[in-house]
């Protein structure tokens, strides 16, 4: 995933992301969003049988079942993040088509 996509997902400018990564320190909100992004990517990978390109494409495209929002844009709140994980769970169970 490109650094710009990651920085937008966790609410940082690319320069700030680079500084934080170099220092190895993020604040609590940034850390929470980064952990959520990694977890979401892991779930998307599993959903797409570990096809990285497919997982990234899904995460960065509008999804009808999520109100036409991009899953990566839903990391700003715990409620939206949970909605994405719940949606993936429903897809995995075959509840949604």
Image (spheres, helix red, strand yellow):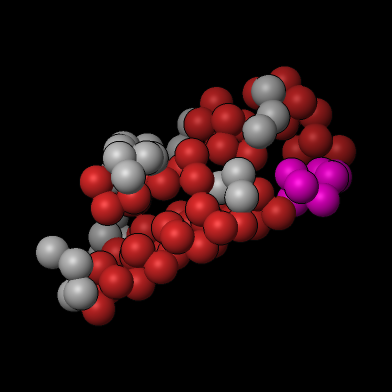
38 up-or-down from 53: above or below: below
Residue that appears at 50% across and 45% down: 74
25 up-or-down from 41: above or below: above
Residue that appears at 76% across and 47% down: 29
Residue that appears at 26% across and 60% down: 48
How many numbered discs sit on the rendered protein? 0
- Horizontal side of 32 relative to 6 (left or right) equals right
The magenta segment is: 24-31
Q: Choose top left, top right, bottom left or bottom right for residue 84.
A: bottom left
Instruction: Give coordinates of residue 23: x percent, y percent.
Output: 86, 38
Where's the C terminus, which quadrant? Answer: bottom left
Instruction: Give coordinates of residue 30: x percent, y percent.
Output: 74, 44
Residue 70 can be seen in this image:
yes
Instruction: Give coordinates of residue 10: x percent, y percent.
Output: 64, 39
**Looking at the image, which is closer to me, 53 or 90?**
90
Instruction: Give coordinates of residue 54: x percent, y percent.
Output: 27, 48
- Horizontal side of 93 relative to 66 (left or right) equals left
Residue that appears at 61% across and 32% down: 7
In magenta stretch: residue 97: no
- Horizontal side of 20 relative to 89 (left or right) equals right
């Amino acid at each position: 995933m490109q650094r710009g996509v990651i920085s937008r997902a966790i609410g940082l400018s690319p320069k700030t992301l680079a500084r934080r990564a170099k220092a190895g320190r993020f604040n609590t909100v940034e850390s929470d969003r980064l952990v959520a992004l990694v977890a979401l990517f892991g779930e998307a990978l599993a959903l797409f049988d570990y096809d990285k390109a497919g997982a990234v494409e899904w995460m960065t495209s509008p999804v009808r079942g999520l109100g036409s929002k991009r899953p990566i844009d839903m990391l700003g709140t715990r409620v939206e993040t949970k909605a994405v994980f719940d949606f993936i769970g429903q897809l995995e169970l075959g509840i949604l088509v």
